[in-house]
């Protein structure tokens, strides 16, 4: 019965995570903390990062077909995010569950509050700026997205997000999407798709750290079942994104963060 439950959880987390570009790790961590109260943070994060990888990989394939991924920017962000993820994953084994849970909850509260206060970035559509990196993405449905951003700022953000994502086992998309939309000015649909691409690369490096340390061996079967569900769910999430507005993507992200943060900080596992 528990394996069926894990498969369903993976399906739901995969669909919702892909819809908002977050890979679902931010939802899966507290669920596993509840289901497995004796598991160490390293074991929990090794499972969630594995699921986040397969979720993000499946989501990237789906978004790639829709031509929403900014591959050039994504590769540059990944180069910065990988070392951050490796460092973060290496530190996880040093944390006990209480400290891990508090850090995780506070991180989610900060991001949730920011997004609820400022759910949309107000800027002129289809804009480029001299001295900044300019991108034009043509989606499969013919929609054209044109935007500008500071590449150096994006690289710095990617390193920080990779570190936090590796440390907390959330993949980083939950932080990367708001950073791309609010700070760098990416259109939300491009941000969610590109975030999935970056998360697929950075989580793989973090998972490798846990494999080397031996933490992953305790949760490999659970990770496998959850990953199967997440892969299937990711395809549904990408398709659902057609019918969800950019503003609602950000709102869903904030609501999800707030609910999980409250559960973590008020009612300890």
Image (cartoon, grey):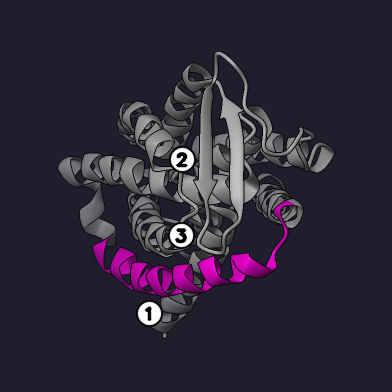
Mark 2 or 1 closer to N-term? 1
Q: Secondary structure at mark 3?
A: helix
Q: Which residue is mark 2?
A: 168
As rendered, which of 58 and 50 lies closer to the eye? 58
Magenta highlight range: 220-246
Q: Position of residue 156 (x, y in %)?
A: 47, 20
Mark 3 or 1 closer to N-term? 1
Furthest toward the front, the residue is 142
| Above or below 201: residue 123 | above
Residue 95 seen from this side: no
Mark 3 or 2 closer to N-term? 3
Q: Secondary structure at mark 2?
A: helix
Question: Which is in the foreground here, disc 3 or disc 2?
Answer: 3
| Above or below 75: residue 263 | below
Numbered tag placed on residue 63 in the rendering: 3
Q: Which residue is mark 1?
A: 3
As rendered, which of 54 and 133 lies closer to the eye? 133
State the predominant SS element of the stretch in magenta: helix
């Amino acid at each position: 019965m528990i394996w069926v439950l894990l498969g369903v959880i993976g399906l739901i987390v995969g669909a919702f995570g892909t819809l908002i570009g977050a890979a679902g790790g931010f939802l899966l961590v507290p669920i596993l903390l509840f289901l497995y109260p004796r598991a160490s943070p390293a074991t929990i994060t090794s499972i969630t990062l594995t699921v986040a990888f397969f979720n993000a990989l499946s989501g990237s394939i789906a978004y790639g077909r829709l031509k929403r991924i900014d591959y050039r920017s994504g590769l540059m962000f990944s180069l910065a995010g990988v070392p951050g993820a490796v460092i973060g994953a290496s530190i996880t084994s040093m944390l006990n569950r209480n400290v891990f849970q508090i850090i995780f909850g506070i991180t989610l509260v900060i991001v949730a509050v920011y997004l609820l206060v400022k759910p949309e970035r107000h800027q002129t559509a289809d804009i480029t700026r001299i001295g900044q990196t300019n991108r034009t993405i043509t989606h499969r449905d013919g929609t054209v997205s044109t935007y500008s951003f500071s590449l150096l700022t994006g690289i710095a953000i990617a390193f920080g997000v990779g570190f936090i994502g590796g440390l907390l086992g959330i993949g980083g998309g939950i932080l990367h999407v708001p950073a791309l939309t609010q700070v760098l000015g990416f259109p939300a649909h491009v941000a969610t798709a590109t975030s999935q691409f970056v998360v697929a690369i950075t989580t793989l490096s973090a998972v490798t750290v846990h494999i080397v340390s031996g933490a992953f061996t305790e949760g490999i079967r659970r990770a496998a079942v959850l990953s199967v569900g997440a892969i299937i769910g990711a395809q549904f999430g990408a398709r659902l994104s057609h019918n969800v507005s950019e503003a609602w993507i950000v709102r869903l992200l904030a609501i999800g963060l707030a609910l999980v943060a409250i559960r973590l900080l008020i009612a300890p596992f």
